[in-house]
Image (cartoon, rainbow, N blue to C red):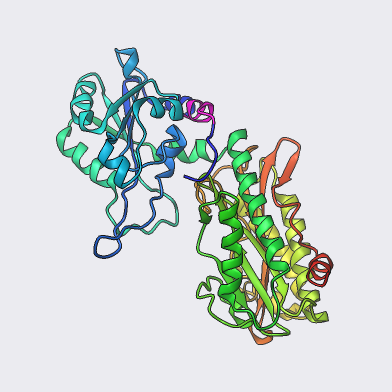
Amino acid sequence: MKYTKISNTLYTENRAKFVKALKPKSIAVFNSNDIMPTNADGTMAFRQNNDILYLSGVDQEESILVLFPDSFHPHHKEILFVKETSEHIAIWEGAKLNKEQATETSGIQTVYWLNQFEKVLNDLMAEAENIYLNSNEHLRAVIEVETREARFNKWCKEKYPLHNYERSAPIMHRIRSVKHPLEIEKMQEACNITGKAFDRVLNFVKPGVMEYEIEAELMHEFLRNRSRGFAYTPIIASGLNATVLHYIENNQECKAGDVILMDVGAEYANYASDMTRAVPVSGKFTPRQKEVYNAVLKVHRESAKLLRPGVYLHEYHKEVGKLMESELLNLGLLDKADIQNQDPNWPAYKKYFMHGTSHFIGLDVHDVGLWHEPIQVGNAFTVEPGIYIREENLGIRLENDFVITKDGLHDMMGHIPIEADEIEDIMNS
């Protein structure tokens, strides 16, 4: 890992929040992610399961966390199992955590090697009544690959069929959605790195550059600031490409007169940032481009004001729709007849703004959270309205990341240029 060490206070407090929600005499088990293969003997870069990371800080494969707060033996209330390191592993892969390092990282005093897991678990199951198993229950998850977690869940139910099984995911969604101050620090660092990269490309963009060259400039700045890289596949979309919501080819030339939409974000310490900006290839927006840009910026700022404790997200999105409807009328993209004749299930504004305005952000760029409960202090969201006009080869989206505070809202990207005039001034300085 490239990032600086995080205090194990974070993980100790996170575990305390989790076990508080368990039924009496319950065991909870969390597994690391697999290292995924590519072809031949190749593998993808390892990315830790966010739930075991959130509860332990252990950022390596073949790790298991067991929580059993009612264990008869105090040293078995929290147990971490890690892959046994060796001189051979140290030479060929790089040393893994030893037991002392695992304790230092996680704050967990009892650490065993992974090959002891089944024996220890079997002893614990004699005391337990409930088993909390974890799974990916994200609302938008599409799961086609069997994970290490899924394999364990299947094995556990076969070996211990008479225990009562519970779900960890609802608890994790609740506690992960409220960010700890140490988490906000890491998210802010991710946003700061993204800002540095944006400053870099503002001085790089000009007619004739390729979208992938901009991507390379961003990646350079991310890596030199201890980021692992992009928090998600970057969108560098010039001209008509900017009207494709998930354009990721990034292989076209940026031409004079066009606008480039960049939806990018650095990851830092496994925490995501998510920023979108739109900049003129030639360094100057046309009057029409600036008119659309400023309409999106107005909706962006007014939308952010609506994100406050007690508000339900589905109601928030309705209100944002009204803001966008007004701007599209002013731009001449809609008229009153469009509004009068609209389908309430697909309002007229959806022709030009077809996606949601905000999502949870944290360890995942589309982080887990409670969509059916009101917003609360500590939640973190994006705000990302956009207008996409295919007939004008123009797509504008503006996105910042926010944390809900007791006093209102903290914009973690408030320092990153967003005003059209400021962007033009920097590009032409």
402 up-or-down from 237: above or below: above
Q: Is residue 312 visible?
A: no
Indicate whether 44 appears above or below 77.
below
Task: Depth check: give the residue in front, 196 or 404.
Answer: 196
Q: What is the span of residues highlighted in magenta in the rendered image? A: 7-14
In which quarter of the view is residue 418 placed?
bottom right
Magenta-drawn stretch, dominant element (helix, strand or loop): helix
Q: Nearer the viewer, residue 416 or 426?
A: 426
Q: Position of residue 329 (x, y in %)?
A: 77, 75
Determine the residue located farthest toward the bottom in the rendered image: 391
Q: Is residue 116 left or right of residue 424?
A: left
Residue at the spot 41% in from the left edge and 28% down from the top edge: 101
The x and y percentages for residue 308 are 70, 44
Examine the rendering and report whether any part of residue 147 can be seen: yes
Q: Is residue 362 left or right of residue 357?
A: left
Please provide percent x and percent y for residue 124: 24, 22
